[in-house]
Amino acid sequence: MVCIIYSDRFLDHDNGRSHPERPERLTAIVDALKHAPWANYLEWQQPTPVADRDVLPWIEKLHRPDYIERVRQLALEGGGLLNMDTPVSPQSYDVALLAVSAWLDGIDRVLDAHSPAFVLARPPGHHAENHSGMGFCLFSNAAIAAYYALTQESINRVAILDWDVHHGNGSQYLTESNPNIAYCSLHQSPCYPGTGASSETGQYNNVLNLPMNPGSTFADYQPAFEQQVVPFLKEFNPDLLIVSAGYDATQADPLAGISLHPSDYKAFVEYIHPVCDRLLFGLEGGYHLQALAQAVVATIGACMVF
Ligand SMILES: [Zn+2]
């Protein structure tokens, strides 16, 4: 059984026509999951409404109040651009709060049910920094979820594995000074946002960045997982593993140049599950609808045997 935390409300964050981070990403995934051979083994859960869970204190732990207020005001005023690539629509603030709530629900669910969960939410989060949104991201969902997890009984160490094709600058900066959080990213280099050199190792050697050359395939990711990702995670020994699950490293993706096949994500799950069986996945990028949906199906399908 895998729990999918999803709401149609996540379709209401509107980046405007022709923006790659669009609501159809979620509807393509939902449709593919409902037609998967193991669809009956999915449990669909609505995120806790923001009125019933005060998510702001968790967001304020990592984001400056003036930045949060700026997003709220932009939405109230009918929307606008936070920066060149990151719009805010009238519903975006409320939807982004609900997305954070969904990620926190994901932590609760994984701890309660001892089975994996997948947060199917927008907007994504791994580029959002303390004082700014960027790269289609408003609030740093994965980092916020990691700090939330550390307040739960039995959780002393949390690792974030970020396999989105872009480096999660926000996730890294917001967690690297905490010795109880590890951050590991495989990302194309050179590529947006330009951060994530292998020399960035965190204050406690709790950061592992693995820049991948454009054109890399599974044959390049396989040794990276076997020789670096898995040993790094084993050494850190997390009580919970959060996967920043972006799917823009597929060959079909229009935003980057890595050549993974959607089915390769099955192998990634098989690498990490023996390291930590408390697994929370949360959607980041992925912009080719069919490849995105197939890759999510491969990820969740791999969890079905646990
Ligand atoms: Zn990305």
Image (cartoon, helix red, strand yellow):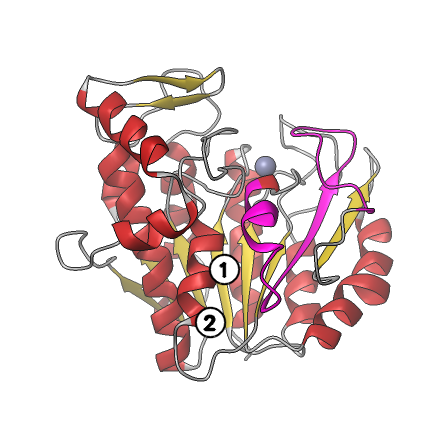
Q: Is residue 179 magenta?
A: yes
Would you name the residue on which mark 1 appears? 281
Q: Quadrant of the N terminus?
A: bottom left
> Over which residues does the magenta segment extend?
170-199
What residue lies at 65% left-to-right and 38% top-to-bottom? 166
Badge number at residue 114: none
Cα distance in 3D space between marks 1 and 2:
8 Å
Report whether the residue tagged 1 is closer than 8 Å to ligand 1: no
Q: Quadrant of the rendered structure where residue 232 is?
A: bottom right
From the top left corner, tell me how far across and down residue 258 is, in percent.
Answer: 75, 37
User: What's the amino acid at mark 2?
Assistant: Pro
| Residue 180 pos. (x, y %) | 58, 69
Q: Residue at (54%, 80%) from the top-left corner?
A: 306
Which residue is more in the foreground, 175 or 6? 175
Q: Which residue is mark 2?
A: 116
- Residue at (33, 32) in percent of width and height: 66
Ligand 1: which quarter? top right
**Label 1 SS:** strand
